[in-house]
């Protein structure tokens, strides 16, 4: 804990945290608003009894068969959409000039000044 700021009776906590992130796998997201539901409905005219009756002893296999049929038709008739703001090239939310300013002008070795510096930077960032 650090000394309180100004005349505050609250102590200042200084927390250093090292984080590591894993590579995020892209998740396929469907644009359900633009789906061809009429085509999906026509494609789904399946004799479900004929398809599922041989599997009547195993509910898990019946579910997997139904799910595979549904997923196949979903991929066929409902378009996917791209998540453009988290592409592989997106790494940092701050622009290059601001990152350079922070790295040149701030010495984080001064633990006493860190809360005030962080407040200053927060204000400077919110103004940009």
Image (cartoon, rainbow, N blue to C red):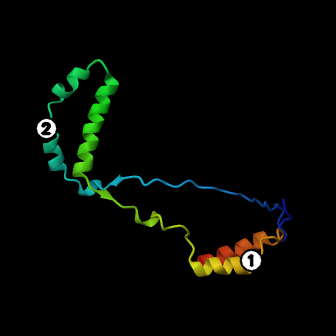
Q: Quadrant of the C terminus?
A: bottom right
Q: Is residue 107 above or below residue 70?
A: below
Q: Is residue 15 above or below residue 71?
A: below
Q: CA distance from mark 1 to mark 2?
A: 66 Å
Q: Is residue 88 left or right of residue 15?
A: left
Confirm or deny contact between disc 1 and disc 2 (CB under 8 A): no
Looking at the picture, how far across and down is residue 65, in whole percent?
Answer: 27, 32
Number of numbered discs on residues? 2
Q: Quadrant of residue 117?
A: bottom right
> Which residue in the rendered view is the most extreme toward the top?
57
Q: Quadrant of residue 70?
A: top left
Residue at 28 percent of width and 53 percent of height: 32
Q: Quadrant of the N terminus?
A: bottom right
Disc 1 element: loop
Disc 2 element: loop
Given residues 26 and 2, the one toward you in this image is 26
Given residues 31 and 80, the one toward you in this image is 80
Provide the residue designation for mark 2. 45
């Amino acid at each position: 804990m650090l000394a309180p700021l100004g005349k505050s009776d609250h102590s200042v906590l200084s927390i250093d945290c090292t984080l590591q992130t894993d590579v995020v796998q892209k998740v396929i997201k469907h644009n359900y608003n633009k789906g061809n539901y009429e085509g999906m409905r026509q494609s789904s005219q399946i004799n479900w009894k004929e398809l599922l009756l041989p599997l009547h002893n195993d509910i898990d296999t019946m579910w997997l068969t139904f799910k595979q049929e549904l997923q196949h038709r979903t991929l066929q008739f409902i378009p996917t959409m791209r998540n453009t703001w988290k592409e592989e090239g997106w790494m940092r939310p701050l622009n290059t000039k601001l990152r350079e300013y922070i790295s040149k002008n701030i010495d984080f070795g001064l633990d006493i000044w860190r809360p005030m510096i962080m407040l200053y930077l927060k204000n400077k960032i919110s103004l940009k």
